[in-house]
Image (cartoon, helix red, strand yellow):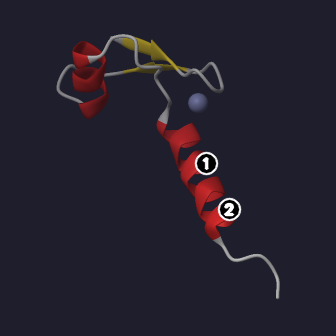
Amino acid sequence: MQLKCQLCGAVDEVTVWSHEYESQKRAPNTPYICPRCRDRIQVEAREQQKPRGH
Ligand SMILES: [Zn+2]
């Protein structure tokens, strides 16, 4: 199954036993985010949680 990342537009081949496939099956309207963008989002979220200068 091929899923297109909603952020960068990359198309990933997702295997039927993967977590991504399961969540798409359960909620087909959920936008797919590729692992690379997911990593980036997590890093950005962590950056935003850092206390701003003193
Ligand atoms: Zn992406």
Outermost residue to the bottom: 54
> What residue is disc 2 on?
48
Residue at 63% over, 26% down:
7
Residue at 22% over, 24% down:
22
Q: Say which element carries label 1.
A: helix
Vertical placement of 46 versus 37: above or below?
A: below
Coordinates of residue 33 in the picture (x, y in percent): 50, 29
Residue at 29% over, 16% down:
27
Return the disc, 1 or 2, that comes first in the chain's sequence.
1
Can you see residue 14? yes
- Depth check: give the residue in front, 23 or 52: 52
Q: Kindly identify the amino acid type of the residue bearing the numbered disc 2.
A: Gln
Can you see residue 15? no
- Depth check: give the residue in front, 18 or 25: 25
| Quarter of the image with the N terminus in it | top left
Q: Say which element carries label 2.
A: helix
Coordinates of residue 31 in the picture (x, y in percent): 47, 20
Residue 50, by quadrant, is: bottom right
Q: How many numbered tags mark residues here?
A: 2
Looking at the rendered image, the disc whose residue lies closer to the viewer, 1 or 2, is 2
Q: Residues within 10 Å of mark 1 (few under 14, many from 20)?
A: few
Q: Residues within 10 Å of mark 2 (few under 14, many from 20)?
A: few
Q: Where residue 1 is drawn, which disc sits there?
A: none
> What residue is disc 1 on?
40
